[in-house]
Image (cartoon, coloured by chain):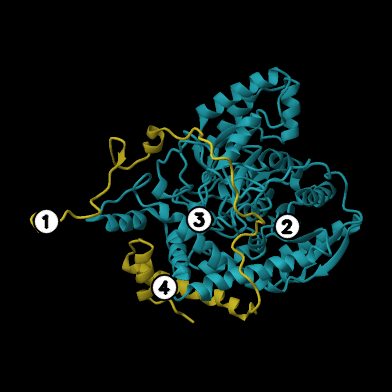
Amino acid sequence: MAEAGTIREIAAALRSRRTSASELARAAIARAKADAYNAWLVVAEDHALVQARAADERISTGDAPLLCGVPWACKDIIGTKDVETTAASRILDGYVPPYSATVVERLDGEGAVMVGKTNLDEFAMGSSNENSAFGPVHNPWDPSRVPGGSSGGSAVSVAAGEVTFALGTDTGGSIRQPGALTGIVGMKPTYGRVSRYGVVAFASSLDQVGPFTRTVEDCAIVCQALFGQDPSDATTMPLPVEDLRRDLDRGVKGMRLGVPKEYFIAGIEPGVERAVRAAIRELESQGAAIEEVSLPSTDSALGVYYIIQPAEASANLARYDGVRFGLRVEGPDLVETYKRTRGAGFGAEVKRRMILGTYALSTGYYDAYYVKAQKVRTVIKEEFERVFGKVDALVTPTSPTVAFGIGAKVNDPLQMYLNDVFTLPVNIAGLPGISIPCGLSEGLPVGLQVIAPYYKEATMFRVAAAYERATMHHTLRPTARDSRPQEVRS
Amino acid sequence: MSEIDPGVVRYVADLARIALTDEEVDRFAAQLSVVLDAVGKLREVDTEHISPTASVLPLENVLREDEAREGLTVEEAMRNAPARDGDLFRVQTVIEERPSGG
């Protein structure tokens, strides 16, 4: 089974009649079914074949968008009409949404073919994909290691060549970090660029939907379809969407790129730092002016994030009460039914965050934790804005480490949370960020993060594409592809 | 700091309507104390004259025309219900009946 091609390769093959959308869909379904990494929760075979037939008809008219007939995978926190959506939680086991998220409808409108739903950390709470109620996802580069999280299944579906692109959600790094750990492109748009309507809400002031792809160009193509105001989501910005591919070939000559010194801290693996420093030198050799900058409050970002995010989550997850949908575990009275339902339906990490978030919002702690965190959020945001007065974009490591072993950090929540120290400040400020492959350390992928000012995704793609062209790290493939994990489900 | 002891975990879990086992209470108390110690670093940041950010969006009061639109049918809205009684979600008694003659 050949791996899925890029969007441009597929578009050319479909238009020259070398293949059909139905043939591509059947191949993608076969790869998804043969997946050995527990990346998929649902393979939606019938749904995909119906979409593929419609795509073939559209292509035969000679007027089809680039994404028409392209197979993709959807993180199972994004609602899909008539296709089970669980957020990898027991509390939503069996839930079938009566409508699709706006992002799914937009891809449907382009004629893209959704192959199925991918595994994740329960309600997107995690950085390793070990918090899924349906078992961990394994990294194709080394199946004894995690793929990152929370969008681990989506990352693996692309990294293992099963589909051309996938959607994830990113609240503190949940697209960029698994993108880095599996050696592919993962991108979080500016807050307000993409509709969240129909997406299971986690932390509403931080969540954004974005793509996983093999190449920066594919990422821009998918973003072009996703971006734009949605009347059903009042947090989408009423902005025109420019051609996101317009600057892909411009190169970085004359650009000013900032390297924040607080992103090279104790705790970063030497191999990761080496790869990222080499990437920065490469950009410099292409004519970018590299400037060291400072974001002094970076070490407070983790604290801000672990107050605001669980606080918002504890409010959002109040809806899982066993009344209108999902699991219900009956108790002697209604309040006891709520407690038993939530006690049985939520996994350990979700419970931890509900406790932490409820605590931070409770009387006596609200000002000391929640309001304080919101104020430091302002400080962090303003530090980024000041730096972007001097530079066009920032380049940093995506994650301090390469993929770690399954089980290595499960009993130490703080160590797990530290995976996201370089990605979560971007969510706190609401900026766009992308992770692109920048080589290997100990045989495992390292990610380079590019952060741009608000709504400057085209600038971010310009830097990422220039680096990608020069190094070709994105063509590296998992070497452990054929070594299957001993046990797929835990 | 370690403000979170098992009693606090029990109290907050009750507010959050989550049943926990004794083992979970003890484990979460220990783990969340470590997390809160790390979060405590926030206190070192001077925020004397800083206003809080609830959302980074420069938007407020997003309005649209008050026009009727198609919504879900009753059947679509009800189909995931754990228990129903016709077109109603069925739950346990919330308010006890007053004893008659009182």
Element under disc 4: helix
Question: Where residue B79 sits in the image (x, y, percent)?
Answer: 37, 36
Regarding residue A268, the answer to whether it shows in the image is no
Q: Which chain is yellow?
A: B
Residue pointed to by mark 1? B99
Q: Amino acid at mark 4?
A: Ala
Regarding residue B80, the answer to whether it shows in the image is yes
Which is more foreground, mark 3 or mark 1? 1
Residue B29, label in figure: 4
3 and 2 marks on the same chain: yes
3 and 4 marks on the same chain: no
Which is more foreground, mark 3 or mark 4? 4
What is the CA distance from the residue labelled 4 to the residue labelled 2? 35 Å
- The residue lying toward the viewer, choosing from A445 and A313, is A313
What is the CA distance from the residue labelled 3 to the residue labelled 4? 21 Å
Within-10-Å neighbours for mark 3: few <14, some 14–19, many 20+: many
Q: Is residue B13 above or below residue A282?
A: below
Residue pointed to by mark 3? A130
Q: Quadrant of residue A258?
A: bottom right
Residue pointed to by mark 2? A449
What is the CA distance from the residue labelled 3 to the residue labelled 1? 52 Å
1 and 4 marks on the same chain: yes
Give the farthest residue toward the front: B66
